[in-house]
Image (cartoon, rainbow, N blue to C red):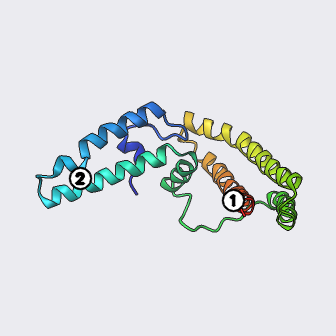
Amino acid sequence: MSNYFQLYNIPESFKPDAAVVKSKFFELSRKYHPDRFSQASEDEQAVALQQSAENNTAYRVLTHADKLMAYILKINNLLEDEEKYSLPPAFLMEMMDLNELVEEYEADPSNATLRQKAYSSVEEAFGALNEALEPLCASYNQDSSQKHLLIKIKDYYFRKKYLLRIQERINTFALR
């Protein structure tokens, strides 16, 4: 796996400097743009195309908080594709209450009060999650040698994924 932090010559962080990331993206875009290699050999064109694609992917990852979190966990060998993660029972109990509320809304989609209560409950859960996650990420940003923080961050990553699925369920149902 490519290291996008090394590619952009920036420190590993959950909040990389947006201006630096954008600047580096444009710099590498100019350097590796396939049009600049139109007269080059096929091998050089293929390399330029690969480097351009890697730059595009790096930019998408480094500018999207959820993708960035997953990426940092992956490059630190703490996250695998399609990983089955066991969330804490207390969290799952909280989510059971939220899922019951969503089921009530699904049973009566015309009930605006239920819809609003479901949305508010999910937003509240996201707020609590982000409130707990921010100091962990900030500590890691200050000292990325604190790998033990990534274990806690991983737990919040999976909690957030769970909440996103509930939110998607509400949104999908609201569009019907």
Q: Residue at x 41, y 36 (%)?
A: 22
Disc nearer the start of the sequence (1/2): 2
- The picture quadrant where one finds residue 132 is top right
Callout 2: helix, strand or loop?
helix
Mark 1: amino acid: Glu
- Location of residue 87 in the rendering, given as x and y in whole percent from the top left corner: 73, 61
- How far apart in space, not on screen, are marks 1 and 2 (Cα)? 38 Å
The C terminus lies in quadrant? bottom right
Specify whether 165 is left or right of 95. left
* Nearer to me, 4 or 59: 59
Which residue is pictured at 42% across the width and 32% down the height?
A: 20
Residue 168 marker: 1
The x, y position of residue 65, in whole percent, is 57, 45
Q: Which mark's residue is nearer the viewer, 1 or 2?
A: 1
| Quarter placement of the N terminus | bottom left
Q: Residue at x 54, y 37 (%)?
A: 15
Residue designated by label 2: 48
**Total labels drawn:** 2
